[in-house]
Amino acid sequence: MKVLVVGSNGMLGQDLMSRLVQTEHTGFGLDIPQIDITSQRELATIVKDLAPGLIINCAAYTAVDKAESEADLAFSVNRDGAANLADVCMNQSIALVHISTDYVFDGNSRQPYKESDPASPIGIYGRSKWEGEEAVRAHLREHLIVRTAWLFGAQGHNFVKTILRLGREREDIKVVADQFGCPTWTGDLADALVRIVRLIADGKTPIQWGTYHFCGKGQTTWYGFAEAIIAEGRQRETLKVRRVVPITTSEYPTPAARPAWSVLDCAKMEQNFGIIPRSWQRGLAEMINELYSV
């Protein structure tokens, strides 16, 4: 099966493409400027020419804080771009896997969020992603929306790389300790997506289309995550940092509000696809091994 990965130059897209080339499926990766999901006409032409059997949309506007002042751009990519993809897929009879986020929830729960829990985003980024989800649902029956959380990987900018950099530069690093979530290595998510590709291509088992959650197993805070990153980093290099200092969200104000609780329940993914997330700690160790081996 031909698989088109939109947003192939991003952190997740690169890991996904590297895994697709090891399968029996043909992966095509496109990103800006080769493809612009905000232009439906251009999108329709490209997809028609490539004729994929499946599209995986990794493209997104992900600058959470900048989205507060660039709302038009965020909605153009995350809502309108998703709608365009779903519409093109409907017209050309193509299935779509669309990547979404834990930020569609407000964080007021203290139980892991299930796919059926009501969305209530508290910022522009989360709202634009939620409206993108709704557009996909409205346009296309054969879709999978995969929500994930706290993504990190060897490619691109992310929290792990930031903490390692600060660990080289500072003796004390202050990190928020009252926001809870599930760190997710892009390699683990890419592996899950490849498993889904194979199930769709195989055609032997009916696909339960709809919304799913996938993230690293276990929960922590940004502070706990940072401590684990520093511990992994110390095994590979000498770091200047002496202490990771826990602080509250109010002590680290940002333009965009963050959910205080972003823990996702991934049981539906295991039940319908047999995909069981690994611990976020194992993903972190593998990502850092990859980072230091470059």
Image: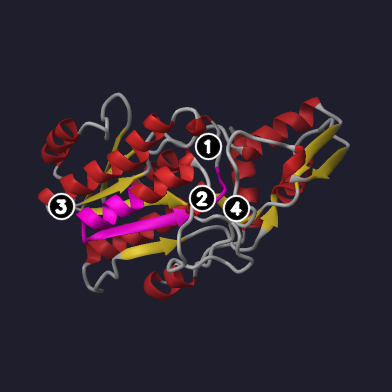
Of the image marks 1 and 2, the number of the one nearer the N terminus: 1
Left or right of residue 131: residue 138 = left
**Residue indicated by mark 4:** 283
At label 4, which amino acid type do we have?
Gly
With 233 as the anchor, is 98 left or right in this view?
A: left
Which is more N-terminal, label 4 or label 2? 2
Q: Position of residue 272 (x, y in %)?
A: 37, 73
Distance Cα–Cα, label 4 vs label 3: 35 Å
Q: Is residue 49 above or below residue 266?
A: above
Whether pointer 1 and pointer 2 mark residues with C-beta atoms closer than 8 Å, the reply is yes
Disc number lying in front (1 or 3): 1
Spatial distance from mark 2 to mark 3, Cα to Cα?
Answer: 27 Å
Rendered image: mark on residue 64: 1
Q: Which residue is mark 3?
A: 90
Give the CA separation, mark 2 to mark 4: 21 Å
Task: Residue type at mark 2: give it.
Answer: Tyr
Helix, strand or loop for disc 2: helix
Q: What's the residue at 43%, 69% (across, down)?
A: 116
Work out whether residue 154 or residue 241 is closer to the camera in this orientation and state it.
Answer: 241
